[in-house]
Amino acid sequence: MFIPCTYQATATQAEGERDAALAERDTLAQALATAKDHVSTVEAELESLK
């Protein structure tokens, strides 16, 4: 059985983990967008060489 202090600490830890996971997702989404932009640029450069 949880006592209120333990419950609050667990909830706070879970919120911190959630926030960290969301930040990581945002970082990965930005990295993916950057990679897609780079691929598009390289594809355009290759197309111009044809």
Image (cartoon, rainbow, N blue to C red):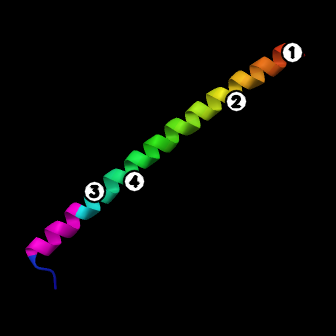
Q: CA distance from mark 4 to mark 2?
A: 27 Å
Q: Which residues are magenta?
A: 4-12
Evaluate if marks 2 and 3 touch, with contact meaning CB atoms under 8 Å apart: no
Q: On the image, numbered disc 4 is attached to which residue?
A: 21
Sequence-first tag of 3 and 1: 3
Secondary structure of the residue carrying numbered label 1: helix
- The correct choice, above or below, for 34 with respect to 15 in the image is above
Amino acid under disc 1: Leu
Indicate whether residue 44 is drawn in magenta: no
Sequence-first tag of 2 and 1: 2
Q: On the image, numbered disc 3 is attached to which residue?
A: 16
For the residue carrying disc 3, how many other residues have a C-alpha within 10 Å: few (<14), some (14-19), or many (20+)? few
Amino acid under disc 2: Val
Q: Residue at 22% of width from left, 69% of height from top?
A: 10
Q: CA distance from mark 2 to mark 3?
A: 35 Å
- Looking at the rendering, which quadrant does residue 12 occupy? bottom left
- Looking at the rendering, which quadrant does residue 4 occupy? bottom left
Sequence-first tag of 1 and 4: 4
Amino acid under disc 4: Ala
Q: CA distance from mark 3 to mark 1?
A: 50 Å
Q: On the image, numbered disc 1 is attached to which residue?
A: 49
Q: On the image, numbered disc 2 is attached to which residue?
A: 39
Secondary structure of the residue carrying numbered label 4: helix
Amino acid under disc 3: Gly
Secondary structure of the residue carrying numbered label 2: helix
On-image quarter of the N terminus: bottom left
